[in-house]
């Protein structure tokens, strides 16, 4: 492929966004720009992530399963190569591969594959050392964003531009807008004859619930009907739009979620979801602005754009004395933040710090079961949108099972770039995914290898249309995912030969990969975090 014809690549990652949170997947949230990319490109409906932010990002960037990339759990170092909490030297990022092939490599947003950082202890951070490498140390020419996993959208506690800390922020700062603006500037700085790779890693719509007032106002009253009605409406929209190859029955409301009719704080709950919707809306607006700039620069037609989410909707409850205690309780200018999910405080502005909680996460993950952390479909399913006018033609939704390990080989095929077998004097593991370019082009494509999942003892293997899955401490379950992707009919015990085969394959992978039993890993994690009980 000639230099002049090589496509630019933009990889956009949302944070904690559920499968059903886009217009194109049945949502009432306004996402016209992403919907247009899907309409004029392709929507993959059976794309899988790794159930949590750090593992997904590590896998996405390296084309390896999270444990092989060094991030089997999160940022804490648990003392083994699979759980060191930062990218291993025998892995290489998309940026390292593409940079070696002449690409300009750009990143704006959330890094979160570089060890553990406590947000209230920024003075002790060791950004840039061996266990806390920055994007610039892993192949990116430019970087603007955060190195840890969470930020205050209006008042970040720690940000970098390249390798220098950002000390001041304008009064109208909002993280989603800022990282997009910076990304556009990076593209504009790229020489005309040099293709670029941009990794735009959003923190939206991850908690805390922060959004512009005008965006929240757009959803005033939309959620007053509650989570049961909203979830049902999304499912009906999906079916009407033929999002999937089969209109599966929706999974029941999660057992831990009470009916909307029994909710006492309806205005507060509706405001939480309105704020969440506003965050997704603003992310889509920023993507629209990026697209407009690409068109203005004449770059849009030959840019491969991919969009997906790092895990399913997040059911984490923001308790005042739980998760909230790990984050600063004042803004950069010294104003006090009211921390936690308090019904007497409406979320959205800079002086709040809340999450949308399990009932609304159950809506985000419709029609599937469970949430972020888990490897049932609600925790690991994401839409994947791909758009490249010069490289792929619009096609109907594709349903082949895919995984984030497939993103790197896809980019390499699209760009004609070689996979580096050695980077920085270190031999690099072979990539573990398969290119999706045939899927993008509407060709028949079936994964030959199983897809494996493990996070916090939640485990799964998908091979063909069967999936074996379990929650930590519970028995294996077996589902025919093509007939029953909402995982309502457990087939365990109906096919002993298949079950034995899948269990053997999973256990072989887990042993080879270095998966720790969660009963062994959890005490190590709690010791690293210096806390006595898990915070979720």
Image (cartoon, rainbow, N blue to C red):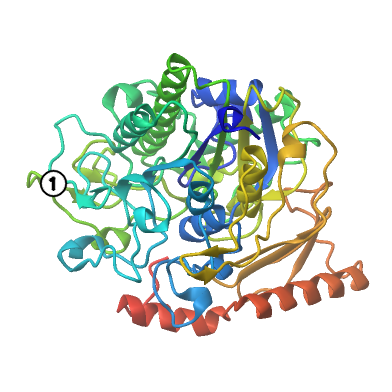
Rendered view: 134 above or below 308: below
The spot of residue 299 in percent (x, y) is 50, 22
Q: In this view, does 268 lie to the left or right of 93?
A: left
In the displayed image of the protein, which residue is found farthest to the top?
296
Residue 26 shows in the view: no
Rendered view: 472 above or below 395: below
Residue drawn where x is 69% and y is 65% of the image = 460
| Image quadrant containing the C terminus | bottom left
Q: In this view, does 213 lie to the left or right of 82?
A: left
Q: Is residue 333 left or right of residue 394?
A: left
Q: Which residue lies under the disc numbered 1?
A: 167
Comparing 433 with 104, the one in front is 104
- In terms of image quadrants, where is residue 41? top right
Number of marks drawn? 1
The spot of residue 25 in percent (x, y) is 62, 31
- In terms of image quadrants, where is residue 248? top right
The spot of residue 292 in percent (x, y) is 44, 17
Comparing 459 with 291, the one in front is 291
- In terms of image quadrants, where is residue 285? top left
Q: In terms of secondary structure, where does tag 1 sit?
A: loop
Rendered view: 129 above or below 353: below
Residue drawn where x is 36% and y is 40% of the image = 265
Residue 302 shows in the view: yes
Residue drawn where x is 49% and y is 27% of the image = 29
Comparing 431 with 213, the one in front is 431
């Amino acid at each position: 492929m000639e230099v002049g014809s090589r496509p630019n690549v933009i990889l956009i990652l949302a944070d904690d966004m559920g499968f059903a949170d886009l217009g194109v997947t049945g949502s009432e949230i306004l996402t016209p720009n992403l919907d247009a990319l899907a309409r004029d490109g392709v929507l993959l409906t059976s794309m899988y992530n790794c159930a949590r932010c750090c593992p997904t990002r590590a896998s996405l960037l390296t084309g390896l399963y999270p444990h092989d990339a060094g991030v089997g759990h999160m940022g804490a170092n648990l003392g083994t190569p699979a759980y060191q909490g930062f990218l291993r030297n025998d892995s290489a990022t998309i940026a390292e591969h593409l940079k070696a092939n002449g690409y300009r490599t750009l990143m704006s947003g959330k890094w979160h594959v570089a060890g553990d950082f406590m947000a209230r202890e920024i003075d002790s951070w060791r950004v840039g050392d061996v266990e806390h490498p920055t994007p610039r140390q892993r192949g990116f020419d430019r970087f603007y964003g955060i190195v840890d996993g969470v930020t205050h959208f209006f008042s970040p506690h720690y940000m970098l531009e390249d390798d220098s800390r950002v000390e001041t922020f304008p009064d109208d700062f909002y993280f989603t807008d800022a990282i997009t603006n910076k990304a556009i500037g990076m593209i504009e700085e790229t020489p005309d004859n040099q293709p670029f790779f941009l990794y735009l890693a959003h923190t939206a719509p991850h908690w805390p619930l922060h959004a512009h007032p005008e965006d929240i106002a757009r959803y005033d009253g939309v959620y007053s009907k509650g989570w049961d009605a909203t979830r049902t409406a999304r499912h009906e929209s999906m079916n009407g739009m033929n999002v999937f190859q089969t209109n599966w029955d929706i999974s029941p409301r999660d057992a831990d979620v009470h009916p909307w009719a029994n909710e006492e704080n309806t205005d507060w709950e509706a405001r939480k979801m309105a704020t969440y919707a506003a965050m997704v809306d603003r992310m889509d607006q920023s993507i629209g602005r990026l697209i407009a700039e690409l068109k203005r620069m004449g770059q849009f037609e030959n840019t491969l754009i991919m969009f997906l989410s790092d895990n399913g909707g997040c059911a984490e409850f923001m308790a005042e004395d739980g998760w909230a205690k790990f984050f600063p309780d004042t803004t950069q200018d010294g104003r006090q933040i009211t921390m936690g999910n308090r019904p007497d405080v409406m979320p959205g502005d800079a002086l709040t710090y809340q999450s949308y909680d399990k009932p609304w996460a159950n809506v985000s993950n419709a029609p599937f079961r469970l949430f972020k952390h888990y490897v049932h479909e609600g925790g690991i399913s994401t839409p994947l949108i791909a758009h490249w006018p010069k490289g792929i033609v619009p096609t109907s939704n594709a349903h082949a099972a895919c995984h984030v390990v497939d993103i790197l080989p896809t980019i390499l095929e699209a760009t004609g770039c070689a996979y580096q077998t050695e980077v920085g004097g270190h031999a690099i593991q072979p990539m573990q995914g398969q290119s999706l370019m045939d899927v993008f082009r509407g060709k028949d494509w079936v994964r030959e290898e199983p897809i494996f999942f493990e996070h916090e003892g939640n485990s799964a293997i998908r091979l063909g249309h069967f999936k074996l899955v379990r929650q930590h401490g519970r028995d294996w379950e077996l589902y025919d995912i093509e007939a029953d992707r909402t995982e309502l009919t457990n087939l365990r015990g109906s096919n002993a030969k298949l079950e034995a085969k899948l269990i053997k394959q999973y256990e072989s992978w887990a042993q080879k990969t270095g998966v720790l039993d969660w009963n062994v890993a959890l005490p190590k994690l709690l010791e690293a975090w210096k806390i006595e009980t898990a915070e979720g």
